[in-house]
Image (cartoon, rainbow, N blue to C red):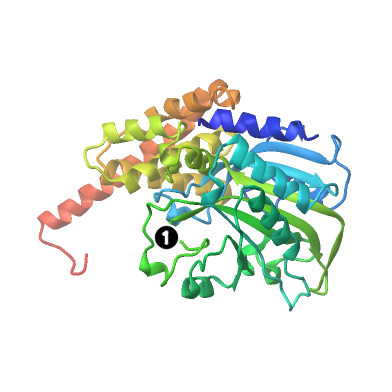
Amino acid sequence: MQSSEIRKKFLEFFEARGHTVIAASSLVPEGDNTTLFTGSGMQPLLKYLLGEPHPVGRRLVNSQKSFRTEDIEEVGDNRHDTFFEMLGNWSLGEYFKEEQLSWIFEFLTSVVGLDPQRMYVTVFAGDKENNIPRDDESVAIWQRLFKEKGMDAKAVEFVTEERGAELGMQGGRIFYYQAKNWWSRAGQPAKMPAREPGGPDSEMFYEFSNIEHDLKFGRYCHPNCDCGRFVEIGNSVFMEYKKNEDGTFSKLSQRNVDFGGGLERIVAASNDNPNIFTIDVFAPLVARIRAGGGTSNPRSEQIVADHVRASVFLIGDGVAPSNKDRGYILRRLIRRAVTHGHYLIGLPMGFLSTLIDTVIMSYEDAYPDLKRDREMIREVFEKEQVAFERTYTNGIKEFEKVLAKGEMISGV
Ligand code: GLY
């Protein structure tokens, strides 16, 4: 399936269930200086999750442009990217686990057509220290949903990923983890500042059995193993807690649902290919990078594709390269793209900015502003690209002069 098709079907599916489509926010958070970028669909909705009434109602849905740098070192493998689209639906104090898990399972299996036999889910194992019970309610719902597909769904208690790697799948379909199944913007309960909302989540994974487990990740594979056999495609956060000033947790005034699904990963799963760089919005970009370079290096090709796409969206939302904050991150992305593109795979100097049109072409219907701002985006990108290519080339020339003079420093 194509990205535009799945995006549209997701919005329609939840609209048909009483949700209102809300516009995606900018990647530059508005009125929120706690974070540099919008990294999830819930971020712009924070005050509504905390109880303020939303002007369009209590059931919302959208596809949110998101940017995260946490996984930047992993970008280049088959499933990590810095920029991505997050499909999101929210219940602001209305429906809860029963509706959410049933609907999202229906969407993934009946609308997207994913095979339920390849789906595995995880749930919260509980946190005694903070007095938060384990999520047996979600387990019962999942067991019923899998049963309706004619499947037994055994629940296995891992708690930690280490335990998962020691025990392996054990014929399970539902797995309890603790840290992995707690979601807040700040991460684990201990890291959450006072007044931050969070809660247990239930995550969905799709299995690609042609990917062999890699022993460097532990003896056995399990849904949260990093070998790539199981790809997380979405998570439903049951956001019903907040952290108090004294570090304890209490219930929010309302029970919320915050679903986030990685559009690129869902599209890849629908095509039965674990590599997100093969989907429609990446394929033309990767093909041009591959054809333009001299050396085949899939990791570098994918890094270039990710970084150029992310740069286009960041510049489109008003970020300019600089030495601090957002501008510094963008500068780093463009420089990494030049380093991988020019120096590792042999793309000609100046080539990267020609990829901007390829990115915009894939997104011009969903994000018409990119088309409108094409020249501005190109100018900002090119300026940084040219400056860095010049610096890098001068550096290499200086280095060659040193080598020619026989002044090689040991260890270089
Ligand atoms: N739905 C929470 C997140 O993954 O951002």
* Residue under the image location 70 percent in, 54 percent down: 144
* Residue drawn at point x = 47 percent, y = 37 percent: 309
- The answer to whether residue 203 is left or right of residue 306 is right
Q: Where is residue 350 in the image (x, y as percent from the top left)?
A: 33, 32
Q: What element carries label 1?
A: loop
Q: Residue 136: percent from the left, percent from the top? A: 73, 65
Residue at horizontal 50%, vertical 31%? 1
If the image is split into quadrants, where does the C terminus sit?
Answer: bottom left
Type of amino acid at the residue the image marks with label 1: Cys
Is the residue marked by circle 1 packed among few (<14), some (14-19), or many (20+) residues within 10 Å?
A: some
- Residue 188, x across and y down, in percent: 66, 67
State the residue at coordinates (31%, 45%): 298
- Tag 1 residue: 227
Query: Which of 373/112 is in front?
Result: 112
Res 315 seen here: yes
Image-quadrant location for residue 86: top right
Q: Where 313 sits versus 153, above or below?
A: above
326 in relation to 6, above or below: below
Front position in the image: 132 or 360:
132
